[in-house]
Amino acid sequence: MTALDSARALAGVRVLLGVSGGIAAYKGAELVRRLRDAGAQVRVVLTENAARFVTALTFQALSGHPVRTSLWDESAEAAMGHIELARWADEILIAPASADLIARLAQGHADDLLTTLCLASTAPLALAPAMNQQMWAHAATQANLGLLRARGVRVFGPACGDQACGESGVGRLLEAVEIVAELVRARGPREMAGQRVLGSAGPTFEDIDPVRFIGNRSSGRMGFAIAAAAAQAGAEVTLVAGPVHLATPAGVARVDVRSARQMRDAVFAHVADCDVFVSAAAVGDYRPQAVAAQKMKKTGQALHLSLVQNPDILAEVAALPRRPFVVGFAAETEHVETHARDKLERKHLDLIVANQVGANLGFERDDNALLLLWPDGRKELPRADKRELARALLACIAALRTTHGGNRS
Ligand code: C5P
């Protein structure tokens, strides 16, 4: 893979890099650089033995994040606990993976932070082994690797050549660029490469006066997860975000707005260039007819606000003569499927993502359950983390665009 091919090939991918104890641990430092060059976000965990070969500080400086070495670090647990770290990862990559670590993983140990994370995470695991050639060739090591491979663990290398111990043979850690290339290859083709995705996310705020507004409970998490997943799938992504406190996903161009009309303008500034529009924002249907210039005072009387309807951004996009593939959301408190199908037809959408909201469902949560409806089909996505749902939704969009001829422009 050339440097150009690898550029941004891991855009937005969260890589948990585990470094185990061996002389090749120093090469892990170079690997952090190469992973970041490819667009990955990297968090590093050193085993206790790795920390004898290299310092956490080196990895902290290169990754830009604190490095963890122990399960028992109270301050680190308070910041990002090990279970959170296990959930955070899209990929776990261990380089170098020592013979001892491979043995412990094969046996399912959880006797230090790194092995615990491997057990606690659903992220795919990849190992880049490095060890003395006799240790590599030993039947125990090979049997352990056989077990791990059978569980779907990917093994990158090792290479053959001179070893730090003075011997020569199979057991050298692959070069950092080769490990990155293997990881990119293992993740498979990027299904949205070359496509442009425009998304909206979050609530809108409609001002009443300089201090008050009408808003809603949308956290923006679903729309941000979709933008992140689209960028990871290789798309060029623009995200129009209502007022939310969320970090911009890697590789995503963000436009911040406040009101529905600002959101409409931002969407229309970008819609002509996009292949897919995913409208996850909870756009306010109404706004005050007039915004008071000064803070409104109590009068002792009932207050009547006159509201006027906002533009329906989604319906306007769907009505464009040259339109992208249009995906809407339907947050419903009852009769979810009926209301959503009605909205799909009324707004002439290609796909609608329905979900039940209300008591402890949908909004302000990290998980959700979705029902995808399109003119001649449906698919249920059971309760899962919003990041996982976002990936499944994009896979469905990609499949529908292939089978239904995609964009109607
Ligand atoms: O009809 P309803 O507002 O429930 O439709 C929800 C869908 O329509 C969402 O995808 C939302 O982003 C979009 N919408 C919009 N403009 C509005 C209201 C909703 O784009 N004014």
Image (spheres, rainbow, N blue to C red):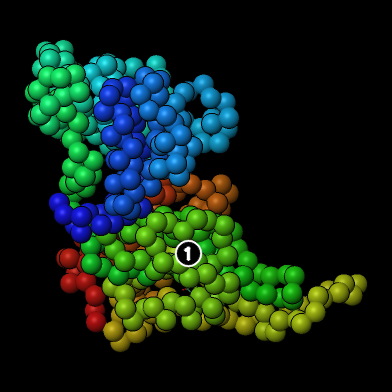
Quarter of the image where the C terminus is located:
bottom left
Q: Amino acid at mark 1?
A: Ala
- Against 274, residue 169 (above or below) is above
The answer to which of 351 and 117 lies nearer the viewer is 117
Q: How many marks?
A: 1
Q: Find residue 207 and report its horizontal and vertical position in percent.
A: 68, 75
At a point 44% along the width and 48% down the height, the residue shown is 368
Is residue 199 depicted above or below 324 in this figure? above
Is residue 55 in view from this perspective?
Answer: yes
Using the image as rendered, state which of residue 45 and residue 277 is in the foreground. Answer: 45
Q: Dot 1 corresponds to which residue?
A: 201
Task: Classify residue 354 as left or right of residue 209.
Answer: left
Q: Residue at x 75, y 81 (%)?
A: 292
Q: Position of residue 162 (x, y in %)?
A: 12, 26
Please tell me in which quadrant of the rendered image residue 20 appears.
top left
In-front residue for pair 79/121: 79
The residue depicted at 42 percent of the width and 81 percent of the height is 268
